[in-house]
Every structure is written in C-alpha cells, then in structure tokens.
Amino acid sequence: MARTLALTLLIACSPVTVDVGGARDADPPDVGSSDGADDSDDSDGADGSDGSDATDGSDGGDGSQTGDPGDTAEDGPVVTADPSTILGHAQECAVALGRIPGFSCQTDAIEVPITVDGVVPGDDEYSTRMDCDRPAMLTGECLPWSKVGHKQGQRWNGDPDPDVDWVFTCRRDRISPGREGGIFNDVAMIGHRKSTGETCFFQSFPYTTVERAPSPMEDPLDTPPGSPTPREFWDPPGDTAAINCANRCHDNDPWVHSPYIDQVMRPDAPTQTLVPAYTGLDRPYTVVGTAFEGWDLPFDQLKPTGNNCTSCHRIGTGGSCSTFADYATGVPGGYPVTDSMQTYPNSHWMPPGNSGTAAEWESQWRDDVEQLIRCCYDSDRSECNKQAIPMTPTR
Ligand code: HEC
C-alpha cells in the first residue's frame, strides 16, 4: 500500500523503456558538450536517415557555448525536416528557443544528494527499499547518484539568451554497478522561454554513462565517432509526447520543484535553485512542436478565491494539485520519507520557511489545502475558479 501512490506517479510520468539501439556499447570518446563544435558548412550533409534534406537548422553543432555562429546567423533556424523526427522537432524548438544544448551527464550535471537523517549513506549502504529524507518525486524512491544540470539559453548567433533556460536530468534506476561509471536509464531535457512561455521536451532512455548527449539538432556528421547521433540518442518526439509530461506532472509551469531536486543550487548563482523558480500567476506556458499537438492545451490552473496557496505560484490540475500538494503539506503518501522528515515542521515544506507551530499551520492553511485537493478531483466545482494558463505573453 505504501508504494501505491509512487507507482501511480511513476506510471503517469514515465513510459516503458525504449531501446534506442545505436552506439550504446561503444566506448565514447571523452567529449564534453563545450568542446567547441567543429561545424562544417556542409549543412545538407545529414545522413538522410531522417528521410529529410536537412539544411540550415541541422547545423547547430552541439549547440553549446561555442559553435560557429557564422554560417546561419542571419537566417536563423528553418524547419526543413519532418516534425515527427527528432531533427524536425529540434528545428521547431530552435525557432522558438535558439540553439539547443548538448551536455554530458558526467561533467555537466550535479549529483542530487540522498540522505538519511541528514547523513549521506556510504556507497554500499544504499538499498532499493530504504527510506530517505528527500525521495525523488518521479520514481518515489531513494536511489542515489541521479544528476541534474542547467544551461542558459543561447541565441542563434551565439549570444547568451537570459530569457531561455535549459534543464536536464540524468536519472538512475539502479544502484549497481556503483556510483562511478554508473548508467543513466532516463535522461530528459526541458527548454523554456520565460517571456513567451514556449517550452520543449526531449526524452531518452539510454542505459549508458552518457558521456555525451548530443544536441537534438546536431548534424550527424558532427557527432564524434563512437558517440550516439541525435537520432540514436533522443526518442522520436511522438514517443516523448506520449509520456504526457506536462498534463501529468509539469502542469503549472515547466519546472517541478521538490525537496529532492531543490537541494541542488546553481553553481553560477548559489542563492538560486538550479531548477528555475518563477513567480507570477499569469506567466505564459505553452508547448512547441507538431508532435505535441495532442496535449491538452491550454493547461488549466486552480484559482479559488481567497486561497492563499495560490498567492505565490500556480497550482495546476495534474500532479501539482494532487500528489505534490499533499506531500508539501505533511501527507507523503507512498513516498518513502524518513520519520524525521515526516515530523512537523520538516513535513510541511509549503509555504516555504513556515515558522509557526503545527496548530498555527493547521488553522492557517488546512482549509486552503483541502479546497485544492477537492478541486483537484473535481475542478469544475464553482469554488475552484478553474482558468486557462495563458499561452501568449500577458505583459
Ligand atoms: C510565500 C509564497 C508561497 C506560498 C504562500 C505557497 N508556496 Fe508553494 N511554492 C513556493 C515556491 C517559492 C515554490 C518553489 C518554486 C515554484 O514552484 O515556483 C513552491 C512550490 C510548490 C509546489 C511544487 C509544485 C511544482 O510544480 O513545482 C507545490 C506542490 C506547492 N508549492 C504547494 C503549495 C501549497 C499547497 C501551498 C499552501 C499551503 C503553497 N504552496 C503556498 C512558494 C509558496
């Protein structure tokens, strides 16, 4: 029973494993994502395996900090490939978000700690059945050594774009074969433009050490030998859309926050969580990509009049109102949380930094939380004041 909830979430947010084949067994060269793409001007040199004549848009190198802004800067990316292929989807995203980064799970991502009563267990002390202080919300488990990373956006001409954030996760679903050289089973990346709300989702189930996740728009000719090409590494966008990431979990905005993920701060801005935290109830949020047209847009938010839980941020009608709101207010459900973290005030991570007694919390917040939970299961009740999340800029 204890695991029922977590299992539900797991099913909701994660599809069955997909075998991407390709170069997984090869020994990838030690190529980081900031190695400076050796962009060639041979922009239609895609291997043709996408069935498309890849031109400008595919020649983004690894889309990371360097690259060659010269070849396509004036025109920007153009959608030339079939949008049901990873290249076509990447081109659609590049039009909205600029250069799409590649990354290395080994060198660009930061480990998310798993602790028990504040202590990091020894590498051989983890077990798949243990409780921990801050389990991962997606898997509902305390598996160690998953990682998360952030890259600032980059305009097509190579300039930094502070309006765009990219966050990628490198998740592990097993303890074996240990911390070093372990394999990542679930690698995903979200890009988001704050001003317009445009958001792109990418997914891979690599089961490799992911020395090099290519930019989804990398020209396969630029992929180093032994490393997976974008089509080998990233799932086709239709498979990613089928996971329903936004409708289920990323429902109120692209970024999901939890005690687990918010342990990691930005190395370049140590007071900020690595996963961006935005305020503003009317910020736009929408999804880019032909393959994602089946998603239920616009997303909805709950705005009950006078409910203070929705005074700082939105609560959506998916994971953020059900499982996450419960967990945030002392009901961890199936999450394997240690006793110390199930004790007030640790058990109540919303609102942030609440300092009153448990009784004060109850009298101030309990009704608001219960209203949200009611609305989560029947959002058409009039008290819920369900409203569409804006899909275009509101200011
Ligand atoms: C004083 C401001 C404030 C109030 C009031 C507040 N929160 Fe939050 N909440 C935050 C911040 C900051 C975050 C992390 C960043 C974010 O999600 O915007 C957050 C995150 C969350 C999340 C994670 C959701 C996600 O998708 O990332 C949930 C769930 C949540 N809050 C529920 C609640 C509930 C339930 C209440 C009422 C008891 C509440 N919050 C009241 C500031 C607040």
Image (spheres, grey):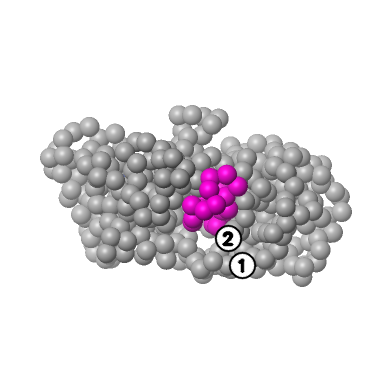
Rendered-image quadrant of the N terminus: bottom left
Residue 347 appears in the figure:
no
The residue lying furthest to the right in this view is 42
Q: Is residue 365 left or right of residue 380?
A: left
**Above or below: residue 266 compared with residue 348:** above
Q: Which residues are magenta?
A: 168-187
Tag 1: residue type? Asp
**336 to 266, vertically: above or below:** below
Residue 87 is marked as none
Q: Tell me the residue at 47%/60% (across/down).
A: 245
Residue 345, by quadrant, is top left
Q: Residue at x 62, y 55 (%)?
A: 208
Q: Residue at x 34, y 41 (%)?
A: 116
Q: CA distance from mark 2 to mark 1?
A: 7 Å
Q: Secondary structure at mark 1?
A: loop
x and y percent of residue 42 in the render?
87, 54
The CB of the residue at mark 1 lies under 8 Å from ligand 1: no
Chain-order first, disc 2 or disc 1: 1
The dominant secondary structure in magenta is loop
Give the amino acid at mark 2.
Phe
Q: Does label 2 point to a residue whose CB lies under 8 Å from ligand 1?
A: no
Whether the magenta-drawn stretch holds residue 270 is answered as no
Asked whether the viewer can see residue 213, the reply is yes
Give yes or no for contact between labels 2 and 1 (Cβ–Cβ under 8 Å).
Answer: yes
Q: Position of residue 121 (x, y in %)?
A: 41, 40
Which disc is residue 205 wearing? 2
Residue 237, horizontal then vertical, whole percent:
60, 64
Whether residue 331 sits left or right of residue 293 in the image: it is left
Closest to the observer: 8 or 271?
8
Residue matched to label 1: 19
For label 2, the SS is loop
Task: Name which residue lies at 47% across and 35% down.
Answer: 265
